[in-house]
Amino acid sequence: MTQRLLETLDRVLAPFRPERGDAPPVWTGRVRSTELAFYPSMFYAQGAVLVLTLVYVFLSLLGRWLNRRAVAPWLRGFCAVLRGEFALVGVDERAPLVWNGSADACLYASGRRGVDAMIATVRLAPRHDLLQLIGTFLYDALVLPAVPLLRGDSVTLSFRLASPRVHGGTLAVIDKQVLQHVRRGRFDLSFARVADVPNASSARSLDERFAIASESGNITDRWLGEVGARGDAQRARTGLVDALNGAGGRFVESLVFTDQPHVQPAHGAVPEGERAERLELTLRLPRTEADVAACVPVLVAALDMIDALHLTALKRSDVMALRPETHVALRKTRAEVDAALDAAASYEADADAEAAREEARRQQQREKREKLSPAEQARREALSKRRAARKAQQTQARRR
């Protein structure tokens, strides 16, 4: 068996063994007293590895260049708009985008009424990593996951709204093609329920490619207007529906307003003083100047909604004002969720404390045992084994 295995291994490795062959060397020479000769046939494996390495490096640099080229039109167009809205856009005016590797980048902006800060996160396909591209493609093709790993280029603009808060609950307008992907694993969107009635979007003059997820019908009415002609005046005041129905709407993946964190807190509810409302706009990355120009009205509409929320919070407008009973329901929901989070955190803390006490007790027992003589250690070990065997026999007898 061993001989057969060695023979099989020898046949597998045979093509990789260098052979001089009958061809003459392409170069001969002497280094001090050593005669040297170069036979290319002895290095074809190393040459193949070198060629593959150079090809991989070239493709990596090409992918890096393609990613930077893909984001350039969006960066120019949106920076021009953002510089008219924010006092500071980017940490460096000449290179406002900060890259994290070759597929992820972010843009920071601050200095605007109603906004503490804005962070735009760009996520691109890993064109610089051929192995990752092939791996994710094969995984999506063979495993067929509900949410594919390989997705297109996108950019998310997250606006952290300034105090005071408007206490407006949670609302999301999501492209139905990515509805499952957007909602997956998000704690904040667990507060909102997707409207599953027929023509839920078109009843509010919104394109049916969008799904509406809201925490309350009153919230939906403030953002998208009431159903039918009764909501036309509100839709005209906000302008959001017109922007989403426009040419830039086909680039919109989601528009989310919430006062909850993206990920469920692991250590209890977020303290009231640390909570903040935010508006997130996620777009499929526009590739051309015309596409960027089509997306600008959507960005402007999002900024207008921020102004409306801020003025409502300051009691200087009622555009986004909710009914008193809606605020009562929102506070009740958050109190229940906060209590559940605190209870879960308390349980985890108690479990960790109990595990720490158990580990300390075991450590103390180990230290006591190490101080015993070898004979006493052997006696106690034998006694422990007899107890374990007796317990196993009793358990087996009860099963019979």
Image (spheres, rainbow, N blue to C red):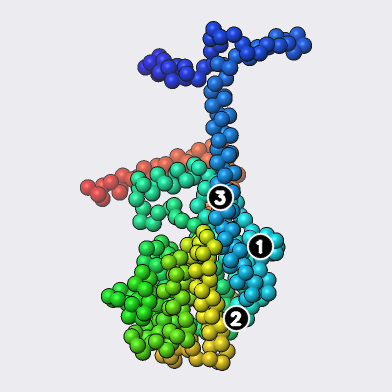
Residue 170, given in percent of the width and then of the height, sits at 45, 77
Position above or below: 400 against 168: above
Mark 3–mark 2 Cα distance, whole angstroms, equals: 36 Å
Labels 1, 2: front one = 1
Q: What's the residue at 68%, 71% (across, down)?
A: 88
Q: Is residue 216 left or right of residue 237?
A: left
Q: Is residue 347 visible?
A: no
* Callout 2 secondary element: loop
Q: What's the residue at 58%, 66% (across, down)?
A: 77
Indicate which disc residue 96 carries: 1
Residue 13, given in percent of the width and then of the height, sits at 47, 19
Mark 1–mark 2 Cα distance, whole angstroms, equals: 22 Å
Closer to the camera in the image, 77 or 82: 77
Q: Residues within 10 Å of mark 2 (few under 14, many from 20)?
A: many
Indicate which disc residue 10 carries: none
Q: Amino acid at mark 1?
A: Pro
* Callout 1 secondary element: loop
C-beta proximity under 8 Å, tags 3 and 2: no
Disc on the earlier residue, 3 or 2: 3
Residue 7, given in percent of the width and then of the height, sits at 41, 15
Q: Residues within 10 Å of mark 3 (few under 14, many from 20)?
A: some
Q: Amino acid at mark 2?
A: Gly
C-beta proximity under 8 Å, tags 3 and 1: no
